[in-house]
Amino acid sequence: MPGHILIVCTANICRSPMAAGLLQHFLAGQTGPLSLLRVISAGTAARHGDPISDNAAVAMKKVGIDLSGHASQPVTQRLLDEALIVLCMTESHRAMIQLQFDPVPQHLYLFRQFLPRPVDPEVDDPYGGPLSVYETCRDNLVEAVPSIVNFLKTITPSS
C-alpha cells in the first residue's frame, strides 16, 4: 500500500515518536493492509538526528516499546505528500502545516480528534517535565489509538 502515517509535533523528540511507536505497535497486530502501514514522525521545528528525550524513552519502555533508535527529522513537503494521513499533536502544528506547505495534505487531523466528545483533542507537550508527565502523555496517546485505527479502516482500501 502506498504512503505512510505521519505524526507531527514540535521537536520530534517526545510526543510524535511516542505516538508513532504506539500506533506502529498497534497496527502490527491488525490484519490485512493496516498491518503493512508504516508510521513515521517529524517535527515542525525539529532538527535532524536528535534522540528521543530520556523520559519519553523510559515511559515507552515501561509499555514494552523501545524507541532508543529514534532520530528526529523536520516535516518536509515530501513527507506530507507521501502520507496517507497526517496526525498532529495540537492545532498549532496543524496550522503551521496549512500555512507553510502547498499542497496541504487532504487527511490532516489531530491525534485525539477521533475520540468521542467531550475530550481535549490536543496532546500537551511533556518536554522538561517529570516522568509522570510523560506517562500521562503516553496514556493520552494510547487512549486515541483505537479511534485512529477505526478511522484508518474507512480510508484504507481493503485487499
Image (cartoon, rainbow, N blue to C red):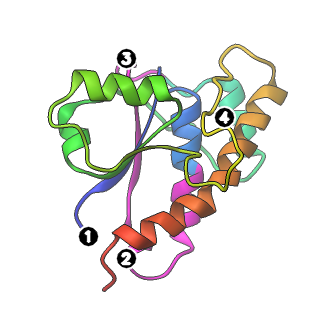
Residue at numbered disc 4: 57
User: What residue is shown at x 41% (from left), y 82% (from top)?
Assistant: 32
- Dot 4, how many residues are within 10 Å of its Cα: few (below 14), some (14-19), or many (20+)? many
Q: Quadrant of residue 145?
A: bottom right
Residue 72, numbered circle: none
Residue at numbered disc 1: 1
Do labels 1 and 2 touch, CB within 8 Å?
yes
| Disc nearer the start of the sequence (1/4) | 1
Q: Horizontally, is 87 left or right of 157 in the view?
A: right
User: What residue is shown at x 37% (from left), y 25% (from top)?
Assistant: 95
Q: Is residue 112 above or below residue 44?
A: below
Q: Is residue 41 magenta?
A: yes
- 2 vs 4, front mark: 2
- 1 vs 4, front mark: 1
- Dot 2, how many residues are within 10 Å of its Cα: few (below 14), some (14-19), or many (20+)? some
Q: Secondary structure at mark 1?
A: loop
Q: Horizontally, is 134 left or right of 125 in the view?
A: right
Q: Horizontally, is 23 left or right of 48 in the view?
A: right
Residue 119: x and y in percent read: 70, 44
Residue furthest to the front in view is 118
| Disc nearer the start of the sequence (1/2) | 1
Give the residues drawn in magenta, as a range: 22-50
Q: Secondary structure at mark 4?
A: helix
Q: Distance of mark 1 from mark 4, alpha carbons? A: 30 Å
Q: Distance of mark 2 from mark 4, alpha carbons? A: 28 Å
Residue 47, numbered circle: 3
Between 112 and 32, the one lying in front of the other is 112
| Disc nearer the start of the sequence (2/4) | 2
Q: Amino acid at mark 1?
A: Met
Residue 138: x and y in percent read: 70, 41
Q: Amino acid at mark 2?
A: Pro
